[in-house]
Amino acid sequence: MKILVCIKQVPESENPILIDDGNAWVQSDEIREFKMNRLDEFAVEEAVLIKETLGDTKIDVLSAGPERATEVIRRSIGMGADAGIHIDTGSERYHSSFEIAAGIAEYARGKPYDLILTGAMSEDNMQGQVGPMIARRLSRPCATAVIFEKIAADKKTIYVEREIEGGQRDTLALPLPAVLTIQSGINTPRYPSLSNLLRANKQGLKRINGADLVQPAARENLVALVYPQKTRSGTVLKGTEKEKATQLIRILREKALLP
Amino acid sequence: MTNDIAVIAEHAGGRLMPVTFELIAFAKKLRQSKSTAIRVLILGAEIKNLARQIADQSGLSVLGFEIPAMPDYNGELYTRILAPYFSADRPLYVCIAHTSRGSDFGPALAIDLNGACISGIEDVLTSDDGICFARPVYGGKLIAHIRPLAATSVLTIQPGIFKPDKQSDHKSGRVVIRQVAAKTHQWRSMGVKQAAMTAKGIAEAEVVVAAGQGIGDKDNLDLINQLAAIFAKSAVAGSRIVCDLGWLEYGCQVGVTGASVSPQLYLACGISGAIQHISGMRGSDFIVAINKDPAAAIFQVADICVVEDLKSFIPILIETYQETRNKA
Protein backbone atom coordinates (compact mmCIF):
# COMPACT_ATOMS: atom_id res chain seq x y z
CA MET A 1 0.00 0.00 0.00
CA LYS A 2 1.24 3.49 -0.84
CA ILE A 3 -0.22 6.45 1.02
CA LEU A 4 0.17 10.20 0.45
CA VAL A 5 -0.69 12.48 3.37
CA CYS A 6 -1.11 16.18 2.60
CA ILE A 7 -0.43 18.44 5.56
CA LYS A 8 -0.19 22.15 6.31
CA GLN A 9 1.70 24.31 8.76
CA VAL A 10 -0.52 26.89 10.47
CA PRO A 11 0.00 29.59 13.12
CA GLU A 12 -0.34 28.49 16.75
CA SER A 13 -4.04 29.11 17.45
CA GLU A 14 -3.64 30.57 20.94
CA ASN A 15 -1.76 33.62 19.67
CA PRO A 16 -3.30 36.75 18.14
CA ILE A 17 -3.16 37.25 14.36
CA LEU A 18 -2.62 40.78 13.05
CA ILE A 19 -3.50 42.21 9.65
CA ASP A 20 -0.95 44.19 7.60
CA ASP A 21 -1.37 47.89 6.83
CA GLY A 22 -2.98 47.40 3.45
CA ASN A 23 -5.52 44.83 4.75
CA ALA A 24 -3.96 42.53 2.15
CA TRP A 25 -2.54 39.74 4.31
CA VAL A 26 -1.61 38.82 7.86
CA GLN A 27 1.55 40.20 9.46
CA SER A 28 3.39 36.93 8.98
CA ASP A 29 6.62 38.34 10.45
CA GLU A 30 4.79 38.78 13.75
CA ILE A 31 3.75 35.13 13.97
CA ARG A 32 6.27 33.56 16.30
CA GLU A 33 4.96 30.02 16.52
CA PHE A 34 3.74 27.64 13.87
CA LYS A 35 2.53 24.06 14.25
CA MET A 36 1.12 21.21 12.23
CA ASN A 37 -2.55 21.77 11.41
CA ARG A 38 -4.33 19.76 14.09
CA LEU A 39 -6.55 17.75 11.75
CA ASP A 40 -3.50 16.88 9.63
CA GLU A 41 -1.91 15.26 12.70
CA PHE A 42 -4.87 12.88 12.76
CA ALA A 43 -4.34 12.19 9.04
CA VAL A 44 -0.65 11.37 9.55
CA GLU A 45 -1.48 9.17 12.55
CA GLU A 46 -4.15 7.31 10.57
CA ALA A 47 -1.61 6.58 7.81
CA VAL A 48 0.89 5.27 10.37
CA LEU A 49 -1.83 3.09 11.96
CA ILE A 50 -2.66 1.64 8.52
CA LYS A 51 1.03 0.91 8.00
CA GLU A 52 1.26 -0.81 11.37
CA THR A 53 -1.84 -2.90 10.63
CA LEU A 54 -1.12 -3.90 7.02
CA GLY A 55 2.67 -3.82 6.92
CA ASP A 56 4.39 -3.36 3.55
CA THR A 57 3.17 0.24 3.34
CA LYS A 58 5.02 3.38 2.35
CA ILE A 59 3.87 6.79 3.55
CA ASP A 60 4.81 9.99 1.73
CA VAL A 61 3.97 13.28 3.41
CA LEU A 62 3.58 16.41 1.31
CA SER A 63 3.22 20.03 2.32
CA ALA A 64 2.82 23.04 0.05
CA GLY A 65 4.03 26.22 1.72
CA PRO A 66 7.00 28.48 2.39
CA GLU A 67 10.34 27.11 3.61
CA ARG A 68 9.04 26.97 7.22
CA ALA A 69 6.56 24.23 6.17
CA THR A 70 9.46 21.74 6.11
CA GLU A 71 9.27 21.68 9.94
CA VAL A 72 5.91 19.90 9.91
CA ILE A 73 7.04 17.49 7.18
CA ARG A 74 9.96 16.46 9.40
CA ARG A 75 7.61 16.16 12.36
CA SER A 76 5.38 13.76 10.41
CA ILE A 77 8.42 11.64 9.50
CA GLY A 78 9.12 11.74 13.23
CA MET A 79 5.62 10.27 13.72
CA GLY A 80 6.39 7.40 11.36
CA ALA A 81 6.00 8.59 7.76
CA ASP A 82 8.68 7.37 5.35
CA ALA A 83 9.46 10.28 3.05
CA GLY A 84 8.70 13.99 2.75
CA ILE A 85 7.92 16.24 -0.21
CA HIS A 86 7.96 20.01 0.03
CA ILE A 87 6.23 22.08 -2.63
CA ASP A 88 7.90 25.42 -2.07
CA THR A 89 5.37 28.21 -2.63
CA GLY A 90 7.93 30.94 -1.98
CA SER A 91 7.17 34.04 0.04
CA GLU A 92 4.31 34.44 2.52
CA ARG A 93 1.04 35.20 0.76
CA TYR A 94 -2.50 33.94 0.27
CA HIS A 95 -2.97 30.79 -1.76
CA SER A 96 -6.45 29.63 -2.73
CA SER A 97 -7.44 26.05 -1.99
CA PHE A 98 -7.86 25.51 -5.73
CA GLU A 99 -4.30 26.62 -6.49
CA ILE A 100 -2.87 24.29 -3.80
CA ALA A 101 -5.09 21.36 -4.84
CA ALA A 102 -4.10 21.80 -8.49
CA GLY A 103 -0.40 21.70 -7.55
CA ILE A 104 -0.72 18.64 -5.32
CA ALA A 105 -2.86 16.81 -7.90
CA GLU A 106 -0.24 17.48 -10.56
CA TYR A 107 2.45 16.05 -8.30
CA ALA A 108 0.38 12.97 -7.43
CA ARG A 109 -0.91 12.28 -10.95
CA GLY A 110 0.35 8.98 -12.30
CA LYS A 111 1.95 8.01 -8.98
CA PRO A 112 0.70 4.75 -7.47
CA TYR A 113 -0.95 6.14 -4.33
CA ASP A 114 -3.71 3.81 -3.11
CA LEU A 115 -4.85 6.35 -0.58
CA ILE A 116 -4.50 10.11 -0.24
CA LEU A 117 -5.29 11.51 3.21
CA THR A 118 -5.53 15.06 4.48
CA GLY A 119 -7.11 16.84 7.44
CA ALA A 120 -10.77 17.76 6.98
CA MET A 121 -9.96 21.47 7.24
CA SER A 122 -7.06 23.83 7.89
CA GLU A 123 -7.23 26.00 10.99
CA ASP A 124 -6.17 29.13 9.13
CA ASN A 125 -8.08 29.13 5.83
CA MET A 126 -10.92 26.92 7.13
CA GLN A 127 -12.29 25.87 3.74
CA GLY A 128 -11.90 22.09 3.70
CA GLN A 129 -11.61 22.18 -0.08
CA VAL A 130 -8.13 20.87 -0.88
CA GLY A 131 -8.92 17.16 -0.28
CA PRO A 132 -12.09 16.91 -2.39
CA MET A 133 -10.50 19.11 -5.08
CA ILE A 134 -7.41 16.87 -5.35
CA ALA A 135 -9.77 13.90 -5.68
CA ARG A 136 -11.72 15.55 -8.49
CA ARG A 137 -8.60 16.66 -10.36
CA LEU A 138 -7.39 13.03 -10.21
CA SER A 139 -10.86 11.55 -10.90
CA ARG A 140 -10.75 9.57 -7.68
CA PRO A 141 -13.60 8.99 -5.24
CA CYS A 142 -13.53 11.01 -2.06
CA ALA A 143 -15.19 11.07 1.34
CA THR A 144 -14.85 14.02 3.73
CA ALA A 145 -14.89 14.30 7.54
CA VAL A 146 -13.93 10.64 8.00
CA ILE A 147 -14.10 9.47 11.63
CA PHE A 148 -13.49 5.75 10.98
CA GLU A 149 -11.98 3.76 8.12
CA LYS A 150 -11.16 0.13 7.42
CA ILE A 151 -9.46 -1.21 4.35
CA ALA A 152 -11.00 -4.46 3.04
CA ALA A 153 -8.92 -7.64 3.16
CA ASP A 154 -8.49 -7.61 -0.63
CA LYS A 155 -7.26 -3.99 -0.42
CA LYS A 156 -9.63 -3.06 -3.23
CA THR A 157 -12.20 -1.10 -1.20
CA ILE A 158 -12.29 1.00 1.95
CA TYR A 159 -15.17 1.22 4.43
CA VAL A 160 -15.65 4.74 5.74
CA GLU A 161 -17.76 6.49 8.37
CA ARG A 162 -18.28 10.22 7.78
CA GLU A 163 -19.21 12.42 10.68
CA ILE A 164 -22.42 14.28 9.92
CA GLU A 165 -24.61 16.60 11.99
CA GLY A 166 -26.19 15.74 15.32
CA GLY A 167 -23.84 12.94 16.38
CA GLN A 168 -24.67 10.76 13.37
CA ARG A 169 -22.38 8.93 10.98
CA ASP A 170 -22.96 8.26 7.29
CA THR A 171 -21.41 4.93 6.35
CA LEU A 172 -20.20 3.95 2.89
CA ALA A 173 -17.62 2.04 0.91
CA LEU A 174 -15.34 3.43 -1.80
CA PRO A 175 -13.08 1.61 -4.26
CA LEU A 176 -9.34 2.26 -3.91
CA PRO A 177 -7.51 4.38 -4.89
CA ALA A 178 -9.44 7.03 -2.98
CA VAL A 179 -9.06 10.32 -1.15
CA LEU A 180 -10.21 10.78 2.47
CA THR A 181 -10.29 13.94 4.56
CA ILE A 182 -9.84 13.07 8.22
CA GLN A 183 -11.91 14.40 11.12
CA SER A 184 -10.46 14.91 14.58
CA GLY A 185 -11.05 12.14 17.12
CA ILE A 186 -10.45 9.28 14.65
CA ASN A 187 -7.32 8.34 16.63
CA THR A 188 -4.84 9.81 19.12
CA PRO A 189 -1.88 11.34 17.27
CA ARG A 190 1.44 10.17 18.70
CA TYR A 191 4.43 12.34 19.50
CA PRO A 192 7.35 12.09 17.08
CA SER A 193 10.10 9.72 18.22
CA LEU A 194 13.65 11.01 18.54
CA SER A 195 15.09 8.29 16.31
CA ASN A 196 12.58 9.08 13.57
CA LEU A 197 13.29 12.81 13.87
CA LEU A 198 16.99 12.13 13.47
CA ARG A 199 16.19 10.03 10.40
CA ALA A 200 14.07 12.91 9.03
CA ASN A 201 17.01 15.30 9.34
CA LYS A 202 19.40 12.80 7.81
CA GLN A 203 17.41 11.68 4.81
CA GLY A 204 16.29 15.14 3.70
CA LEU A 205 13.16 16.09 1.79
CA LYS A 206 12.26 16.12 -1.86
CA ARG A 207 11.85 19.76 -2.87
CA ILE A 208 9.65 20.92 -5.72
CA ASN A 209 9.49 24.52 -6.84
CA GLY A 210 5.84 25.53 -6.78
CA ALA A 211 6.41 27.78 -9.77
CA ASP A 212 7.32 24.71 -11.84
CA LEU A 213 3.88 23.19 -11.27
CA VAL A 214 0.71 24.06 -13.15
CA GLN A 215 -0.46 27.63 -12.47
CA PRO A 216 -4.16 27.64 -13.29
CA ALA A 217 -5.96 30.97 -13.60
CA ALA A 218 -7.31 32.09 -10.22
CA ARG A 219 -11.02 31.52 -9.75
CA GLU A 220 -11.37 33.84 -6.79
CA ASN A 221 -9.13 36.29 -5.00
CA LEU A 222 -8.66 37.67 -1.54
CA VAL A 223 -9.76 41.30 -1.61
CA ALA A 224 -9.16 42.16 2.04
CA LEU A 225 -8.74 40.83 5.54
CA VAL A 226 -10.60 42.62 8.32
CA TYR A 227 -11.18 42.17 12.03
CA PRO A 228 -14.64 40.83 12.85
CA GLN A 229 -17.35 42.99 14.33
CA LYS A 230 -19.09 41.87 17.45
CA THR A 231 -22.58 40.56 16.87
CA ARG A 232 -23.59 41.22 20.47
CA SER A 233 -22.67 44.44 22.20
CA GLY A 234 -20.72 42.56 24.81
CA THR A 235 -19.49 44.35 27.91
CA VAL A 236 -15.80 43.87 28.58
CA LEU A 237 -15.29 43.79 32.34
CA LYS A 238 -12.49 46.03 33.63
CA GLY A 239 -10.33 46.10 36.74
CA THR A 240 -8.47 43.49 38.72
CA GLU A 241 -9.46 39.85 38.68
CA LYS A 242 -11.27 40.32 41.98
CA GLU A 243 -13.14 43.37 40.66
CA LYS A 244 -14.17 41.50 37.53
CA ALA A 245 -15.36 38.56 39.63
CA THR A 246 -17.41 40.89 41.84
CA GLN A 247 -19.01 42.55 38.80
CA LEU A 248 -19.79 39.21 37.18
CA ILE A 249 -21.42 37.78 40.33
CA ARG A 250 -23.51 40.98 40.65
CA ILE A 251 -24.64 40.75 36.99
CA LEU A 252 -25.57 37.08 37.38
CA ARG A 253 -27.55 37.87 40.53
CA GLU A 254 -29.38 40.72 38.79
CA LYS A 255 -30.37 38.25 36.10
CA ALA A 256 -31.56 35.86 38.81
CA LEU A 257 -29.09 33.26 37.58
CA LEU A 258 -27.45 33.01 40.99
CA PRO A 259 -28.96 33.08 44.48
CA MET B 1 -24.27 31.70 -19.31
CA THR B 2 -26.91 33.44 -17.27
CA ASN B 3 -27.09 35.50 -14.13
CA ASP B 4 -29.32 32.90 -12.52
CA ILE B 5 -28.89 31.73 -8.98
CA ALA B 6 -29.39 28.09 -8.07
CA VAL B 7 -30.10 26.82 -4.56
CA ILE B 8 -29.58 23.19 -3.56
CA ALA B 9 -32.16 22.15 -0.93
CA GLU B 10 -31.07 20.02 2.01
CA HIS B 11 -33.34 17.37 3.47
CA ALA B 12 -33.08 14.32 5.71
CA GLY B 13 -35.53 11.76 7.01
CA GLY B 14 -38.32 13.04 4.75
CA ARG B 15 -38.10 16.60 6.10
CA LEU B 16 -36.59 19.79 4.75
CA MET B 17 -33.71 21.17 6.78
CA PRO B 18 -34.30 24.78 7.95
CA VAL B 19 -31.06 25.77 6.19
CA THR B 20 -32.88 25.32 2.86
CA PHE B 21 -34.90 28.46 3.54
CA GLU B 22 -31.82 30.27 4.81
CA LEU B 23 -30.17 29.52 1.45
CA ILE B 24 -33.21 30.98 -0.30
CA ALA B 25 -32.98 34.12 1.87
CA PHE B 26 -29.27 34.34 0.98
CA ALA B 27 -30.03 33.95 -2.74
CA LYS B 28 -32.64 36.73 -2.55
CA LYS B 29 -30.12 38.99 -0.84
CA LEU B 30 -27.56 38.13 -3.50
CA ARG B 31 -29.62 38.86 -6.59
CA GLN B 32 -29.05 42.22 -8.23
CA SER B 33 -32.65 42.70 -9.26
CA LYS B 34 -36.00 40.99 -8.97
CA SER B 35 -35.61 39.83 -12.57
CA THR B 36 -32.71 37.54 -11.64
CA ALA B 37 -34.16 34.05 -11.59
CA ILE B 38 -33.66 31.85 -8.56
CA ARG B 39 -34.28 28.14 -8.98
CA VAL B 40 -34.24 25.58 -6.22
CA LEU B 41 -33.04 22.03 -6.86
CA ILE B 42 -33.73 19.02 -4.73
CA LEU B 43 -32.37 15.47 -5.13
CA GLY B 44 -33.66 12.33 -3.49
CA ALA B 45 -35.89 9.27 -3.56
CA GLU B 46 -39.15 10.84 -2.42
CA ILE B 47 -38.98 14.55 -2.96
CA LYS B 48 -42.30 15.49 -4.63
CA ASN B 49 -43.90 16.77 -1.43
CA LEU B 50 -40.73 18.52 -0.30
CA ALA B 51 -40.41 20.25 -3.69
CA ARG B 52 -44.03 21.41 -3.40
CA GLN B 53 -43.40 22.73 0.13
CA ILE B 54 -40.44 24.80 -1.07
CA ALA B 55 -42.42 26.19 -4.01
CA ASP B 56 -45.36 27.08 -1.75
CA GLN B 57 -43.28 28.75 0.92
CA SER B 58 -40.79 30.59 -1.29
CA GLY B 59 -42.71 31.32 -4.49
CA LEU B 60 -39.70 30.06 -6.43
CA SER B 61 -39.63 27.43 -9.14
CA VAL B 62 -38.33 24.08 -7.98
CA LEU B 63 -36.72 21.30 -9.98
CA GLY B 64 -36.69 17.89 -8.33
CA PHE B 65 -34.48 15.00 -9.40
CA GLU B 66 -36.32 11.90 -8.28
CA ILE B 67 -33.85 9.06 -7.94
CA PRO B 68 -35.39 5.75 -6.79
CA ALA B 69 -33.87 4.26 -3.61
CA MET B 70 -31.41 7.10 -3.18
CA PRO B 71 -30.36 7.62 0.46
CA ASP B 72 -30.61 11.13 1.93
CA TYR B 73 -27.07 11.83 0.75
CA ASN B 74 -24.68 10.21 -1.69
CA GLY B 75 -21.72 12.35 -2.74
CA GLU B 76 -21.26 10.61 -6.07
CA LEU B 77 -24.93 11.01 -7.06
CA TYR B 78 -24.95 14.71 -6.15
CA THR B 79 -22.00 15.53 -8.43
CA ARG B 80 -23.04 13.02 -11.11
CA ILE B 81 -26.41 14.76 -11.49
CA LEU B 82 -25.60 18.38 -10.73
CA ALA B 83 -22.38 18.80 -12.74
CA PRO B 84 -23.86 17.94 -16.18
CA TYR B 85 -27.07 19.81 -15.37
CA PHE B 86 -25.23 23.04 -14.51
CA SER B 87 -22.71 22.59 -17.34
CA ALA B 88 -25.61 22.73 -19.79
CA ASP B 89 -27.31 25.68 -18.11
CA ARG B 90 -24.76 27.67 -16.15
CA PRO B 91 -25.90 29.72 -13.20
CA LEU B 92 -23.79 32.59 -11.84
CA TYR B 93 -24.04 31.20 -8.32
CA VAL B 94 -24.82 27.80 -6.84
CA CYS B 95 -25.81 28.18 -3.17
CA ILE B 96 -25.20 25.16 -0.95
CA ALA B 97 -25.41 24.70 2.83
CA HIS B 98 -22.06 24.68 4.63
CA THR B 99 -22.85 21.35 6.26
CA SER B 100 -21.26 17.91 6.19
CA ARG B 101 -22.92 17.40 2.81
CA GLY B 102 -22.34 20.76 1.19
CA SER B 103 -18.68 20.67 2.22
CA ASP B 104 -18.45 17.20 0.68
CA PHE B 105 -19.86 17.79 -2.82
CA GLY B 106 -19.37 21.58 -3.19
CA PRO B 107 -15.62 21.56 -3.99
CA ALA B 108 -15.99 18.66 -6.45
CA LEU B 109 -18.86 20.45 -8.19
CA ALA B 110 -16.75 23.61 -8.48
CA ILE B 111 -13.92 21.64 -10.14
CA ASP B 112 -16.35 20.06 -12.62
CA LEU B 113 -17.77 23.50 -13.51
CA ASN B 114 -14.35 25.22 -13.66
CA GLY B 115 -15.86 27.50 -11.07
CA ALA B 116 -14.85 29.31 -7.93
CA CYS B 117 -15.55 27.64 -4.60
CA ILE B 118 -16.08 29.85 -1.55
CA SER B 119 -16.90 28.06 1.70
CA GLY B 120 -18.53 29.01 4.98
CA ILE B 121 -19.93 32.36 3.82
CA GLU B 122 -21.38 34.59 6.55
CA ASP B 123 -22.10 37.80 4.63
CA VAL B 124 -22.49 39.37 1.18
CA LEU B 125 -20.78 42.70 0.49
CA THR B 126 -21.71 44.81 -2.49
CA SER B 127 -19.57 47.66 -3.77
CA ASP B 128 -18.87 49.41 -7.09
CA ASP B 129 -16.22 46.78 -7.76
CA GLY B 130 -18.78 44.00 -7.53
CA ILE B 131 -19.80 41.39 -5.02
CA CYS B 132 -17.56 39.97 -2.30
CA PHE B 133 -18.25 37.23 0.21
CA ALA B 134 -17.17 37.43 3.82
CA ARG B 135 -15.99 34.26 5.52
CA PRO B 136 -14.15 33.60 8.79
CA VAL B 137 -10.48 32.57 8.79
CA TYR B 138 -7.92 31.85 11.55
CA GLY B 139 -10.54 30.38 13.89
CA GLY B 140 -12.80 33.40 13.43
CA LYS B 141 -10.15 35.90 14.54
CA LEU B 142 -10.24 37.48 11.08
CA ILE B 143 -12.73 37.80 8.24
CA ALA B 144 -11.63 37.33 4.62
CA HIS B 145 -13.40 39.13 1.79
CA ILE B 146 -13.29 36.91 -1.26
CA ARG B 147 -14.27 37.98 -4.77
CA PRO B 148 -15.23 35.31 -7.29
CA LEU B 149 -13.57 35.63 -10.71
CA ALA B 150 -15.04 32.60 -12.49
CA ALA B 151 -18.20 32.48 -14.60
CA THR B 152 -19.83 30.21 -12.03
CA SER B 153 -19.26 30.20 -8.29
CA VAL B 154 -20.14 27.44 -5.88
CA LEU B 155 -20.93 29.04 -2.51
CA THR B 156 -21.40 27.19 0.76
CA ILE B 157 -23.32 29.26 3.29
CA GLN B 158 -22.90 28.97 7.04
CA PRO B 159 -26.20 27.78 8.59
CA GLY B 160 -27.90 29.98 11.18
CA ILE B 161 -26.86 33.33 9.68
CA PHE B 162 -29.41 34.31 7.02
CA LYS B 163 -32.93 34.47 8.42
CA PRO B 164 -35.67 33.12 6.18
CA ASP B 165 -38.14 35.82 5.09
CA LYS B 166 -41.77 35.24 5.93
CA GLN B 167 -43.40 36.81 2.91
CA SER B 168 -46.80 35.52 2.01
CA ASP B 169 -47.77 37.77 -0.92
CA HIS B 170 -46.30 35.54 -3.58
CA LYS B 171 -47.87 32.84 -5.66
CA SER B 172 -46.67 29.32 -5.25
CA GLY B 173 -43.76 28.47 -7.56
CA ARG B 174 -43.74 25.91 -10.33
CA VAL B 175 -42.58 22.38 -9.55
CA VAL B 176 -40.98 20.13 -12.15
CA ILE B 177 -39.96 16.60 -11.22
CA ARG B 178 -37.51 14.66 -13.39
CA GLN B 179 -37.20 10.93 -12.93
CA VAL B 180 -33.56 9.91 -13.04
CA ALA B 181 -32.28 6.34 -13.09
CA ALA B 182 -28.81 7.06 -11.78
CA LYS B 183 -26.45 4.37 -10.61
CA THR B 184 -23.40 4.81 -8.46
CA HIS B 185 -20.11 3.25 -9.47
CA GLN B 186 -17.98 4.33 -6.56
CA TRP B 187 -19.82 5.60 -3.50
CA ARG B 188 -21.75 2.68 -2.00
CA SER B 189 -24.03 4.03 0.73
CA MET B 190 -24.40 1.75 3.74
CA GLY B 191 -26.76 3.79 5.88
CA VAL B 192 -26.69 6.37 8.66
CA LYS B 193 -26.01 5.36 12.23
CA GLN B 194 -26.28 7.22 15.51
CA ALA B 195 -22.83 7.44 17.07
CA ALA B 196 -22.83 9.48 20.25
CA MET B 197 -25.97 10.17 22.23
CA THR B 198 -26.14 13.61 23.77
CA ALA B 199 -25.41 13.37 27.47
CA LYS B 200 -28.49 13.78 29.59
CA GLY B 201 -28.92 17.20 31.00
CA ILE B 202 -27.07 19.39 28.52
CA ALA B 203 -30.13 20.16 26.44
CA GLU B 204 -32.39 20.72 29.47
CA ALA B 205 -29.93 22.58 31.70
CA GLU B 206 -30.70 26.23 32.48
CA VAL B 207 -27.01 26.96 32.90
CA VAL B 208 -24.33 25.36 30.75
CA VAL B 209 -20.70 25.74 31.85
CA ALA B 210 -18.55 24.80 28.89
CA ALA B 211 -14.84 23.99 28.80
CA GLY B 212 -12.54 24.64 25.85
CA GLN B 213 -8.94 23.81 25.10
CA GLY B 214 -8.00 26.85 27.18
CA ILE B 215 -8.54 24.84 30.35
CA GLY B 216 -5.12 23.48 29.48
CA ASP B 217 -5.27 20.21 31.34
CA LYS B 218 -7.83 17.56 32.17
CA ASP B 219 -7.29 18.21 35.89
CA ASN B 220 -8.64 21.73 35.43
CA LEU B 221 -12.05 20.22 34.65
CA ASP B 222 -12.44 20.25 38.44
CA LEU B 223 -12.62 24.04 38.23
CA ILE B 224 -15.37 23.79 35.62
CA ASN B 225 -17.29 21.29 37.78
CA GLN B 226 -16.91 23.51 40.84
CA LEU B 227 -18.13 26.52 38.90
CA ALA B 228 -21.13 24.59 37.55
CA ALA B 229 -21.95 23.52 41.11
CA ILE B 230 -22.75 27.09 42.21
CA PHE B 231 -25.67 27.23 39.75
CA ALA B 232 -28.97 25.40 40.03
CA LYS B 233 -29.94 23.13 37.09
CA SER B 234 -26.51 23.35 35.53
CA ALA B 235 -24.56 21.02 33.28
CA VAL B 236 -20.94 20.78 32.13
CA ALA B 237 -20.28 20.71 28.40
CA GLY B 238 -17.23 21.05 26.18
CA SER B 239 -15.95 22.05 22.79
CA ARG B 240 -14.99 19.51 20.16
CA ILE B 241 -11.32 19.66 21.01
CA VAL B 242 -11.93 18.86 24.69
CA CYS B 243 -13.90 15.77 23.66
CA ASP B 244 -11.21 14.78 21.10
CA LEU B 245 -8.64 14.96 23.89
CA GLY B 246 -10.78 12.56 25.91
CA TRP B 247 -11.29 15.08 28.72
CA LEU B 248 -15.07 14.86 28.31
CA GLU B 249 -17.38 12.33 26.66
CA TYR B 250 -18.49 13.12 23.10
CA GLY B 251 -22.04 13.29 24.46
CA CYS B 252 -21.03 16.51 26.24
CA GLN B 253 -19.95 18.21 23.04
CA VAL B 254 -21.71 21.43 22.01
CA GLY B 255 -21.50 22.42 18.35
CA VAL B 256 -22.32 21.38 14.81
CA THR B 257 -21.29 17.78 15.33
CA GLY B 258 -22.63 17.64 18.89
CA ALA B 259 -25.56 19.13 20.76
CA SER B 260 -27.26 22.46 20.15
CA VAL B 261 -28.20 24.22 23.38
CA SER B 262 -30.04 27.41 24.30
CA PRO B 263 -29.83 27.76 28.09
CA GLN B 264 -30.53 30.91 30.13
CA LEU B 265 -26.79 31.23 30.75
CA TYR B 266 -23.89 29.86 28.72
CA LEU B 267 -20.57 30.24 30.48
CA ALA B 268 -17.76 29.61 27.99
CA CYS B 269 -14.44 28.90 29.74
CA GLY B 270 -11.32 28.83 27.59
CA ILE B 271 -13.35 28.36 24.43
CA SER B 272 -11.87 30.00 21.34
CA GLY B 273 -15.23 30.27 19.60
CA ALA B 274 -14.87 28.45 16.29
CA ILE B 275 -17.99 28.83 14.18
CA GLN B 276 -18.69 25.09 14.56
CA HIS B 277 -18.99 25.63 18.32
CA ILE B 278 -20.87 28.92 18.13
CA SER B 279 -23.49 27.31 15.88
CA GLY B 280 -24.40 25.06 18.79
CA MET B 281 -24.79 27.75 21.46
CA ARG B 282 -25.58 31.05 19.79
CA GLY B 283 -29.24 30.74 20.81
CA SER B 284 -28.36 31.02 24.51
CA ASP B 285 -30.16 33.86 26.35
CA PHE B 286 -27.03 35.20 28.03
CA ILE B 287 -23.42 34.38 27.20
CA VAL B 288 -20.43 34.96 29.45
CA ALA B 289 -16.98 34.20 28.04
CA ILE B 290 -13.76 33.80 29.99
CA ASN B 291 -10.63 33.65 27.84
CA LYS B 292 -7.12 35.02 28.23
CA ASP B 293 -6.88 35.84 24.50
CA PRO B 294 -8.68 39.17 23.95
CA ALA B 295 -8.94 38.34 20.22
CA ALA B 296 -10.76 35.04 20.85
CA ALA B 297 -13.78 34.79 18.53
CA ILE B 298 -16.03 33.77 21.43
CA PHE B 299 -16.00 37.44 22.56
CA GLN B 300 -17.83 38.37 19.36
CA VAL B 301 -20.96 36.60 20.58
CA ALA B 302 -20.59 37.12 24.34
CA ASP B 303 -22.71 39.50 26.43
CA ILE B 304 -20.03 39.65 29.11
CA CYS B 305 -16.37 39.35 28.21
CA VAL B 306 -13.80 38.46 30.86
CA VAL B 307 -10.23 38.63 29.56
CA GLU B 308 -8.48 36.56 32.21
CA ASP B 309 -6.80 33.20 32.62
CA LEU B 310 -9.59 30.93 33.81
CA LYS B 311 -7.20 28.96 36.01
CA SER B 312 -6.83 31.93 38.34
CA PHE B 313 -10.16 33.64 37.63
CA ILE B 314 -12.58 30.78 38.31
CA PRO B 315 -11.34 30.16 41.89
CA ILE B 316 -11.66 33.90 42.58
CA LEU B 317 -15.13 33.91 41.02
CA ILE B 318 -16.31 31.00 43.19
CA GLU B 319 -14.73 32.57 46.29
CA THR B 320 -16.43 35.92 45.54
CA TYR B 321 -19.78 34.18 45.12
CA GLN B 322 -19.41 32.40 48.46
CA GLU B 323 -18.30 35.55 50.31
CA THR B 324 -21.16 37.66 48.98
CA ARG B 325 -23.72 34.92 49.55
CA ASN B 326 -22.76 34.63 53.20
CA LYS B 327 -23.17 38.37 53.59
CA ALA B 328 -26.60 38.36 52.02
Image (cartoon, coloured by chain):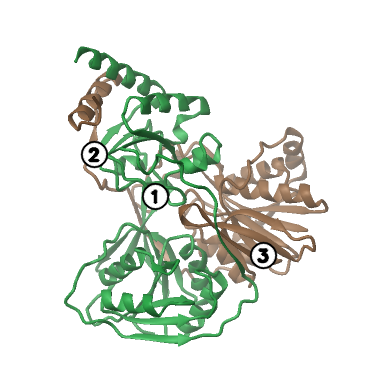
Chain colours: A brown, B green
Q: Residues within 10 Å of mark 2 (few under 14, many from 20)?
A: some
Which residue lies at the image location 38% right of the left edge and 86% below the top edge?
B176
Q: Residues within 10 Å of mark 3 (few under 14, many from 20)?
A: many
Q: Which mark is residue B87?
A: none
Which residue lies at the image location 60% right of the left edge and 80% below the top edge?
B183
Quarter of the image for the C terminus of chain A: give it.
top left
Query: Which image quadrant is residue B215 in?
Result: top left
* Discs 3 and 1 lie in a common subunit: no
| Residue B143 position in % (x across, y down) | 35, 52
| Residue B53 position in % (x across, y down) | 32, 75
Q: Which residue is mark 3?
A: A178
Give the spatial CA distance, label 3 vs label 1.
Answer: 29 Å
Which residue lies at the image location 60% right of the left edge and 71% below the top edge?
A137
Q: Which residue is mark 1?
A: B275
Q: Is B295 displayed left or right of B180 in the figure?
A: left
Q: Which residue is mark 2?
A: A234
- The answer, for residue B129, to whether it is visible in the render is no
At mark 1, the secondary structure is helix
Query: Which image quadrant is residue B193 in?
Result: bottom right
Q: Is residue B250 above or below residue B3?
A: above
Q: Nearer the viewer, residue B35 or A218?
A: B35
- The answer, for residue B101, to whether it is visible in the render is yes
Q: Is residue A191 above or below residue A222?
A: above
Give the spatial CA distance, label 1 vs label 2.
Answer: 18 Å
Q: Amino acid at mark 3?
A: Ala
Q: Nearer the viewer, residue A59 or A184?
A: A184
Chain letter for mark 3? A
Q: Residues within 10 Å of mark 1 (few under 14, many from 20)?
A: many
